Image (spheres, helix red, strand yellow):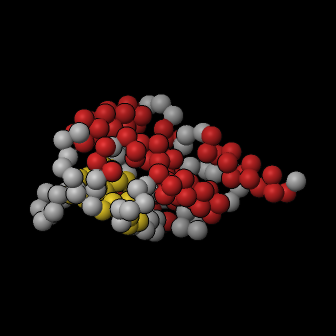
Amino acid sequence: MKRKYSALLILLPLLFQPSISQGGPCDDYYKTTLSAQLRQDQNRSDGSILVFGDSIIQSISFSDAAHTIVNYGIACDTIPRLTKRILQYPSIKTASKIFINIGINDILFYTPVGSKKDYFTYTYYQLIKQLPQKTPVFFICILPVNENQGEHLKGHNE
């Protein structure tokens, strides 16, 4: 009985979107940005380097890079949302490398039932299963949160 209960605690939060994605301006922005990215992706050349993530990635300019680097960051993104959208990009099949930085919104806004470690293990595993097996994938670590910037950030580094 304990095993079934533990599995339920891990899976239960995955049935719901994070609070930042339940309507409102963030959802509209997310959908509009995703739609624009998918239209642009149809014109990508084979061998591009793809970078996926949230607002941290979206705010980076790669225009001076020596290689073709395509920025697919979307503000408010979470691990479950990225897992759902990543295969929608045709260029994922021909990318030379993929970089991913995702998870800070999950830490800040998603309150999983049960262990945060179980939540992240499960959601990252689901994301990894979506990625092409022969393409090198690099995960960029989530940087620590400055917990001194407000009470709402206390305990997030744990």
Residue 95: % across, % down: 28, 56
Query: Could you tell whether 77 is left or right of 122 in the image?
Result: left
Query: Could you tell whether 25 is left or right of 111 in the image?
Result: left
Seen in the picture, residue 103 relative to 75 is either above or below; the reply is: below
Residue 34: % across, % down: 33, 38
Q: Quadrant of residue 36?
A: top left
Q: Quadrant of residue 88?
A: top left
Seen in the picture, residue 92 relative to 38 is either above or below; the reply is: below
Seen in the picture, residue 62 relative to 33 is either above or below; the reply is: below
Observer-nearest of 91 and 30: 91
Query: Could you tell whether 32 is left or right of 1 in the image?
Result: left
Q: Residue at x 30, y 62 (%)?
A: 97
Image quarter of the C terminus: bottom right
Residue 5: % across, % down: 80, 52
Observer-nearest of 53 and 91: 91
Q: Residue pushed farthest right?
A: 1
Q: Residue at x 60, y 39 (%)?
A: 16
Residue 44: % across, % down: 20, 46
